[in-house]
């Protein structure tokens, strides 16, 4: 922040005496105050349904969903959520781009809102929450040279960017989202996707299992104990099992 006495950059400065990386308490306190007043909701464009700062993975994947889910897959999704949240609290960016699927009974808001707020509070630059429609509009405005509050270029350069792939997402829009992830990767920045859909185009967002990168996302997905047809009858959709198999 411009008035910061420590002249920090995104919440971090180098202590002139110890030469160590330090978290800027001045900016952190200012942002804590903003969050107390709810000012950050406007900046991050968090809809009213996305409230709360406290994080617990059990509030994202509720106990009622567990009998349907493979325990190991749930644990790996929870572990990934914890890693991301505890990182941004220390101003550390995720070391990979991520595609989360918490399952159809999840409360994804209980991850999205705390993650974005904690990153913001820590002093990181956080883009507003985006949907694929936002990305398409921002890119068009950028190409046409239109002035907007928060531009496509601003999104590319924000340290934290969360994209919700809603049920209405089209395969073209997935390409726009992938393009944004790639442009962010050139800036060495990760992109975090949260989805409920198993559209055929979605696997183009993901890289090989095991490798970490910014330009392709690692899939962290719950798996169902029994094969579960999602959105039966729509030929554009595939079952979760079939989707997961494309990564094996
Ligand atoms: Zn500062």
Image (tube, grey):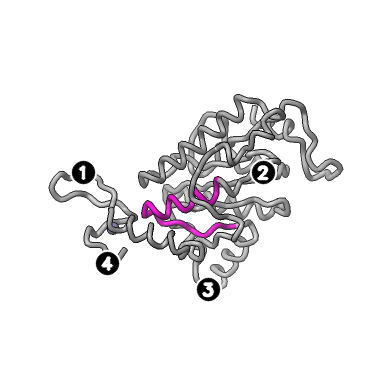
Q: Which residue is denoted by mark 3 in the rendering? A: 145
Q: Quadrant of the N terminus?
A: bottom left
Q: Nearer the viewer, mark 4 or mark 3?
A: 4
Q: Residue at x 42, y 55 (%)?
A: 120
Residue 230 as seen in the image, left or right of residue 124:
right
Q: Which residues are magenta?
A: 111-130
Residue 56 picture location, percent across and down: 52, 40
Looking at the picture, does residue 47 appear above or below residue 232? below
Q: Main secondary structure of the magenta part?
A: helix
Residue at mark 1 to residue at mark 2: CA–CA distance: 41 Å
Q: Nearer the viewer, mark 3 or mark 1?
A: 1
Q: Residue at x 78, y 43 (%)?
A: 237
Quadrant hosting residue 202: top right
Among numbered discs 1 and 4, the one appearing first in the sequence? 4
Among numbered discs 4 and 3, the one appearing first in the sequence? 4
Label 1 Cα neighbours within 10 Å, binned few <14 / some 14-19 / many ≥20: few
Q: Quadrant of the C terminus?
A: top right
């Amino acid at each position: 922040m411009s008035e910061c006495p420590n002249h920090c950059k995104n919440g971090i400065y180098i202590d002139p005496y110890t030469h160590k990386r330090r978290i800027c308490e001045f900016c952190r306190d200012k942002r804590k105050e903003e969050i107390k007043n709810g000012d950050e909701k406007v900046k991050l464009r968090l809809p009213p349904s996305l409230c709360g700062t406290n994080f617990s993975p059990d509030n994202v994947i509720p106990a009622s969903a567990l009998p349907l889910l493979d325990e190991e897959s749930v644990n790996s999704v929870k572990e990934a959520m914890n890693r991301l949240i505890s990182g941004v609290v220390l101003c550390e960016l995720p070391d990979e781009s991520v595609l989360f699927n918490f399952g159809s009974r999840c409360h994804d808001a209980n991850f999205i809102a705390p993650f974005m707020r904690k990153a913001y509070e820590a002093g990181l630059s956080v883009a507003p929450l985006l949907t694929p429609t936002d990305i398409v509009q921002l890119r068009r405005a950028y190409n046409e040279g239109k002035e907007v509050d928060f531009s496509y270029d601003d999104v590319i350069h924000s340290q934290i960017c969360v994209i919700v792939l809603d049920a209405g997402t089209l395969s073209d829009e997935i390409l726009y989202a992938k393009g944004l992830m790639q442009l962010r990767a050139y800036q060495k920045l990760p992109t975090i996707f949260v989805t409920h859909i198993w559209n055929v185009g979605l696997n183009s967002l993901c890289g090989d299992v095991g490798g970490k990168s910014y330009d392709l996302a690692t899939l962290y997905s719950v798996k169902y104990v029994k094969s579960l047809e999602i959105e039966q009858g729509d030929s554009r959709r595939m079952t979760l099992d079939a989707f997961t198999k494309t990564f094996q």
